[in-house]
Every structure is written in structure tokens, then in C-alpha cells.
Amino acid sequence: MAQNLGDILGNKTFIIAEIGQNHQGDIETAKKLILVAKECGADCAKFQKTNLTGKFTQAVLNRPYKSVNSFGETYGQHKAFLEFSEDEFRALQAYANEVGIQFTASAMDMKSLEFLVEIGVPFVKIGSGDANNFLLIEEAARKSIPLVISTGMQSFETVKKIYNTVSKYHKDFALLHCISAYPTPSEDINLRVLKLYQEEFPDIAIGYSGHELDIDISSAAVALGSKIIERHITLDKQQKGTDHNCSLEPREFKQLVTNIRNLEKALGQSVKKIQSSEMACYEKLGKTIVYSKHLLKGHSITFGDLDIKVAEPRGIDGSKIDSIYGKILNKNIEKDESLQPTHLL
């Protein structure tokens, strides 16, 4: 039975390990990345699925691609080298199921969308490159499959159009704030956009897809309410390819997951109370009301009769001092004696 996005995301930050094309066109490397993503604590391993003629014009595919990151003489040859067949995708999905991590991909074109729906991925990702492809977005929305849509390279007006387009069909989707720069300078990230999205689109999940070099900013996105974090993962940042330099190696990705899980614990609830972990300090150093002078039975307590100190035994908490003024003593009192409820009429 298909799940809705809320069930898929659960109650914790949903962490996507974006493998993308960091597998170098090798299925065994792709499997290793899936396993590493699982071992690092990611919730989902994500790839990219492309039908080249559905995404690119022939002129783009025929363009010479002279680059240190090239896997072919033309851009089409380069992209074809990095693309897995449908059978290979099914094998990767089966392997992800075997190791116990969710598996999905970005649909880069209509044919790829149909394929991902056919193999039953839990949700389809729409990357920033297709965030203005409203033919693809509307068709994906019609499928009634959960969607996660990145919004890099788009104006806020376009983001609102994405929201309105998908909302005609369902609200089972998320928007990710994203800056499509590899790597992204800190000053361009603008994490406050998360709050803008949360205010403008309060009925869907909001997340963050990051391409910065560190892991702290992604953790900050969680502190600002991001429900989804997506980061690229690689086995080696020095490998050939344009995404490796802004991807996280296994040690970094694992630390990111640890940081996020610790942050979730620290965020807690909007309830202020004395925590059980504070009681030892409270018993040792918490201030209590004491008498500042010798007082006689029948005295009406006034300002100046009381002080607040660390005392033994403990008495009434210092925060209650205003409620004590005007009370009558039922016994003689010594200076520095802790004020107890039994002292008062």
C-alpha cells in the first residue's frame, strides 16, 4: 500500500543521501554508496534517472565536452556513461531494500517519471533543474505519488506557482530550499528562506538541499524547522565529476547525521520546567528563603526580614518570597534559619 509523505518522513528529520551520479557509472560503486549511506544513518539513498533525449536537445548532446570531469568526447557520451539502464536501476532498488534503506531518484524527464512510478519508489524527487518544468511537475502531480521538489535557480513567484500547481491535485509534497551552486558560498544560502516557505506554505513539509562545503549549515536548517535534509555523498571528494567537491565523504555524512539527531533531542518541546538532570545542581546550589534576623513568634513578616541563600535544610523556594510578606510566625526564629511552611500561621 502506498504511503503518504508524512508517513515516509516520520517524526524525525528525513535525511536523503544524494548519490546522484557520484557512482562514476559503475553499479558496484553505486551499491557501495547505498551501503555507506545506510551505515551513515541516512533514511534514503537517491539517484538521478534520465532519458537523455527527453531531457536534452540533440544539439546539447552533440556538443563537445572538453573537461577534466568528462567521461566522453561529447556531452551526450558523457551523460550516457553515467546513466544506468532500467534493469540496473531495479537491481539497485533491490539492493537498497536488502540493506534496509529507502530508494528513489530524481525524474529528469517524462519517461523517467513513468519508470520511477512503475517501480514503486516511495516518492519522486524533482530537482532544481526541473523546478520550472511545469509540464513535468503537473504530470508528476497527476500521478498522486508523493513529491519532493527542490527550488534552486527559481524566483519566489515560480516557487508559488509550483505550490499552486501541485496543490490542484494533492498536498502530498515537500519543497526544499536550495541554491544550485557547487559549492554554495555561505553568504548565498539565505536559510531564512526556510521561514518564508514555512509561513507561505504551512500545510506542506519544508526542507533543505545543501551544496555547501561544511555540515554546520545543514544542522542549522534543522534548527530552523527543516523536515528534510538532502546532501550529496561520495566515497572520495577527489574523484572526477562536478559534484564530488561539494559532497560529503562517509565520515562527514555520518557526523552530519549524528549532529542532526543530537540537535533533535536538544530542540525538545516548548515547555519550560525543571529537568530531572538539573535536580542534583538544584539540591546543591538552588537558593531558598531564609530569615535575615532573629524574629519572635507572632511577628508579621515584612520586607527586610528575609533573604535568599543556599541553605541546609532547604526551605521554601526563593521564587515564592513575595507570597511570604504579611504572614505571621508561629514560633521564634533564628537568623539564617530556612523558612519552612510549618513556621507560618
Image (tube, helix red, strand yellow):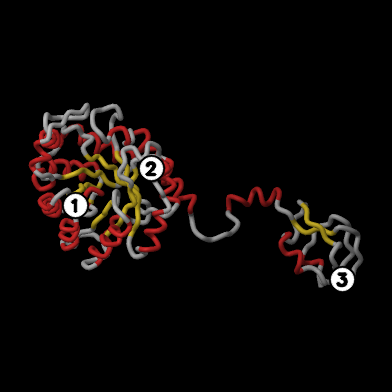
Which of these two is toward me, 153 or 82? 153
Q: Amino acid at mark 1?
A: Val
Q: Amino acid at mark 3?
A: Ser
Which residue is painted at 28% across and 31% down in the image?
A: 235
How crowded pointer 2 is (Cα within 10 Å; few <14, some 14-19, many 20+) is rated as many
Q: Amino acid at mark 2?
A: Val
Residue 266 locus on image (x, y percent): 49, 50
Which of these two is toward me, 64 or 214? 64
Identify the residue position indicated by label 2 in the image: 257
How crowded pointer 3 is (Cα within 10 Å; few <14, some 14-19, many 20+) is rated as some
Residue 67, compared with residue 184, is above or below; it is above
Identify the residue position indicated by label 1 in the image: 121
The quarter of the image holding the N terminus is: bottom left
Identify the residue position indicated by label 3 in the image: 300
Which residue is painted at 33% across and 46% down in the image?
A: 179
Specify whether 323 is left or right of 6. Answer: right
